[in-house]
Amino acid sequence: MSARSGTNPAAGPRTELPVVPTDAPPACAARLVHDFTPALIDVGAHHLCPGCGEPIAMRSMVEQVEELGQVDRAIAVFGIGCYTAYSNNLDIEVLQALHGRAPSLATGVKRCRPDTLVFTVQGDGDMVNEGLLEVLHTAARGENVTCFMLNNGVFGETGGHMTAATVLGQRTKNTLDGRDAAQHGYPIRLANLIAELDGAAYVARGAVNNAVNITRTNRLIKNAFRTQLEGRGFSFVEILTMCPTGWFVDTVDAPGYLDDALAATHRPGVLKDVRGGTATQNGPNSRKGTAS
């Protein structure tokens, strides 16, 4: 029987495969071939769980800030969640908001400093449960800021409890048998709601569970920033992230779980883009552009 089947393989090397001995230190220590860490991330270590998708999403954001040449103009406003650890790891201006209030704080910053690139970083608990009022009114006013929501469907920092974005059937600390519509109601698809508001100029949803989705999400983030830089109004990107700890799944299974559970309800894609004249998923764009 092989190790893959769940039992230990026979002792001794497998002659048909090259074997890397692990019972002693290697003769040559591993060396760093190239440092791919974005310059704006000045501390490589973080305390987030193995398999968490939030560090990937944070990296995507700062990479786009660098590529757009906005390093000296960027101001981030953080909500409260696991991702808040990065408020000390980024070499840009960062403000800390109270629970759910980041869009309002970002509004004040942008109105005082219209020459800056202002964006919020929030989780689904922070934005949908605690700050739904803030983000909806910010979008409705057409504030020229960008909001990012890292959606893993749980309150990760407080132990993995249900949020308003938790999908039906998803197990959390307080929905051990899965979210039930009759008892807990239905998940809020925030990107879809925001896309219906006339003040929203760009609305999209991405994911970071594989290389293809990360590449697509990078493009969504960059387009959201461009929307702000062009002065077109409110831009919003929801990013589906992994939380194996809060999902009760193994780290290696988390990317697949994201596809099967979250992405089946919160479908990735561009919901609205006045720059390209696209329609929303649920109706025509009544602000600018034409429905495609």
Image: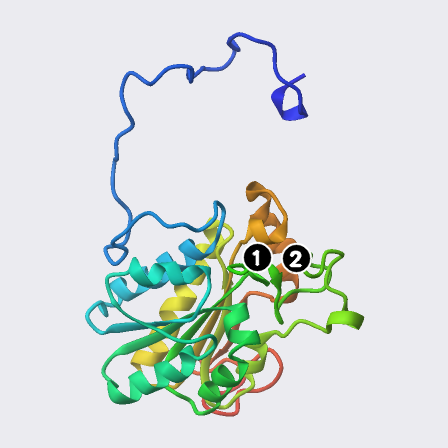
Q: Residue 69, how many percent across, how many down?
A: 22, 67
Horizontal placement of 11 versus 143: left or right? Answer: right
Residue 289 visible to an observer of this rendering: no
Q: Residue 214, how many percent across, how many down?
A: 44, 55
> Upstream in the sequence, badge 2 or badge 1?
1
Residue 143 visible to an observer of this rendering: yes
Q: Residues within 10 Å of mark 2 (few under 14, many from 20)?
A: some
Label 1: which secondary element? loop
- What residue sits 48% from the left and 92% below the top? 287
Marks 2 and 1, how far apart at CA:
7 Å
| Labels 2 and 1 touching (C-beta < 8 A) | yes
Q: Which residue type does callout 2 highlight?
A: Lys
In which quadrant of the rendered view does residue 186 lie?
A: bottom right
Q: Residue 126, how many percent across, how many down?
A: 50, 72
- What residue sits 29% from the left and 16% below the top? 27
In the rendered picture of this protein, how many numbered marks are placed on residues? 2
Q: Is the N terminus in the top left, top right, bottom left or bottom right quadrant?
A: top right
Label 2: which secondary element? loop
Q: Which residue is mark 1?
A: 159
Q: Which residue is mark 2?
A: 173
- Looking at the rendered structure, which numbered label has been put on residue 190? none
Looking at the image, is 6 positioned above or below residue 204? above
Q: Residue 133, how many percent across, how many down?
A: 53, 85
Horizontal placement of 163 versus 17: left or right? Answer: right
Rendering colour mode? rainbow
Q: Nearer the viewer, residue 176 or 137?
A: 176
Q: Is the C terminus in the top left, top right, bottom left or bottom right quadrant?
A: bottom right
Q: Which residue type does callout 1 highlight?
A: Gly
- What residue sits 26% from the left and 72% below the top? 74
Horizontal placement of 79 versus 10: left or right? Answer: left
Q: Residue furthest right?
A: 182
